[in-house]
Image (tube, coloured by chain):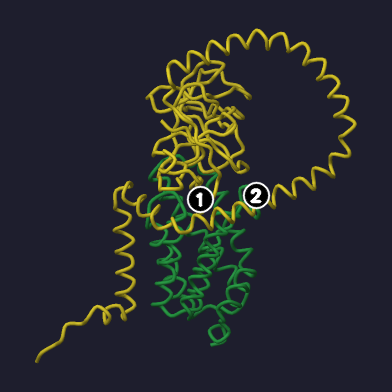
Amino acid sequence: MRTSTPSFSDILKNPIAAIIILLAISLSFLFLPPKISNHIKMTCVVPMRPLQWATCFCSNSANNFLDKVFSGWRNAHVKKQLEEQVSQFKNKILEQQDTIYKLQSKLYTLSKFQAENKSKTKPVPADIIGYDSLTFRKSITVNAGSNHGVKPNDIVVSNNALIGKVVSVSGGSCVVQLITDPASRIPGRVLQTREQVIVEGNATGFCQLKYVPRWAKLKKGDDIVSSDIGGFYPPSLPIATVVETEVKGGDLFQSVKVLPKVNLSKIEQVLVITK
Amino acid sequence: MRWFTFFCILLGVSLFQSTLMNWINIGSAAPDLYFPLVIFYSFLADIKRNTITNWFVGMSKDLFSEGSFGVNSVFFVAMGFFVWSIRGILFRGHLVTQVLVTFIFSCIYNILYAVHTTLSFHSLSLSATIWTIFICSLYTAMIVPVLFWIFSKLQPTQQFFHQ
């Protein structure tokens, strides 16, 4: 008795076979090297980027319009207080002017030095066009890519503070892993005490400091800046501010909670520092 | 089931989830718009279509997020299969059932994803993670009535819920 071999369409008709095939495809994606899977991801979502950009643009415009309406309404109440403050600031400006003249000469010397040394970094301004859709991952998509000279591992800043690094790049966009992402580890230093720390994301609005010795005297308000240990990040970029420290019973290290310098949920533009 | 409608819904959900969430986030509580879609099709479709739609929903979530590519499609296919297998004993046309099932399975999915993230990076704190899972799942369940209403308008389901 002869039995015919089932065709591929016959196999697909069987629900269990369909489940197994789809799971096998997903699992094969899971075991791909990150470089290849990131490349597949970036290629697949390229057609969606203009839509994302348009949606984000409309959302930001609407947000700004509403902000203006509300701030106009609130401004009427604080106008008087502001006028008083302005007169005080005017006097302060006069005092500061003298200092500015002194600093200007220093700045001129530094600029000249930098121009002569031809800085190897170039900032690329970019707009945020998308956010991560997972609860436990924190990344953003910006509209600067390899066409603008952006490469993986370039650092990203906003308001002169470090906010993350580029993890995957396509022609016109790139994905930035934020400092609050659980996979993010940044070598840092406490500005005031010079302790070396690791700033680690934990998928919340805050970050945590790792390997802070028990005896380190950190207090609320201390600033954390990047350190050039490892040579990956430029030194002295502000990262976060200490908000809470706790020394638990037998732990070797302190538990320190820090708040990023930039409100990551409210930024609209960033600077990608290309090497 | 109309596949074109499904892909339009998926596109809309992906766009909203990846761009406009700042409008509806409440503090750290962010709803997952993909998950109600998984539950909706698990209640609505037969096993094969349910599997395929959930796989596409998972892949879409994977594409718009940082992290392992494929992990969400595995979780969504598994979640969809479990919901499909127990739907016979549920009164799936009732709103309370839809909200409760979404909440419970969203918690399970988030716990699985948190375990996966913890195994990969060791950096999630337990208390914050439990709180995030609870509020995100609760918020996801709370928006189910609205989402199911929109989905059923786009993809009529009356015949399925009254079987």
- Which of discs 1 and 2 lies nearer the camera? The answer is 2
Q: CA distance from mark 1 to mark 2?
A: 17 Å
Q: Secondary structure at mark 2?
A: helix
Q: Position of residue B66 (x, y in %)?
A: 44, 49
Q: Chain of mark 2?
A: A
Which chain, by letter, is green? B
Residue at the far bottom in the pictured view: A1
Q: Nearer the viewer, residue A158 or A23?
A: A158
- Categorize mark 1 by other alpha carbons within 10 Å: few (<14), some (14-19), many (20+): many
Q: Residue at x 58, y 55 (%)?
A: A54
Q: Nearer the viewer, residue B60 or B137?
A: B60
Of the image marks 1 and 2, the number of the one nearer the N terminus: 2
Above or below — where is B100 with respect to A2?
above
For the residue marked with disc 2, what is the amino acid? Asn
Q: Which residue has dot 1 on it?
A: A132
- State whether discs 1 and 2 lie on one chain: yes
Q: Secondary structure at mark 1?
A: loop
Q: Chain of mark 1?
A: A
Q: Which mark is residue A60?
A: 2
Q: Position of residue A193 (x, y in %)?
A: 54, 15
Residue at the far right in the pictured view: A80
Above or below — where is B19 with respect to B121?
below
For the residue marked with disc 1, what is the amino acid? Asp
* Residues at marks 1 and 2 touching, judged by CB atoms closer than 8 Å: no
Q: Residue at x 56, y 49 (%)?
A: B132
Q: Residue at x 53, y 58 (%)?
A: A51
Q: How many marks?
A: 2
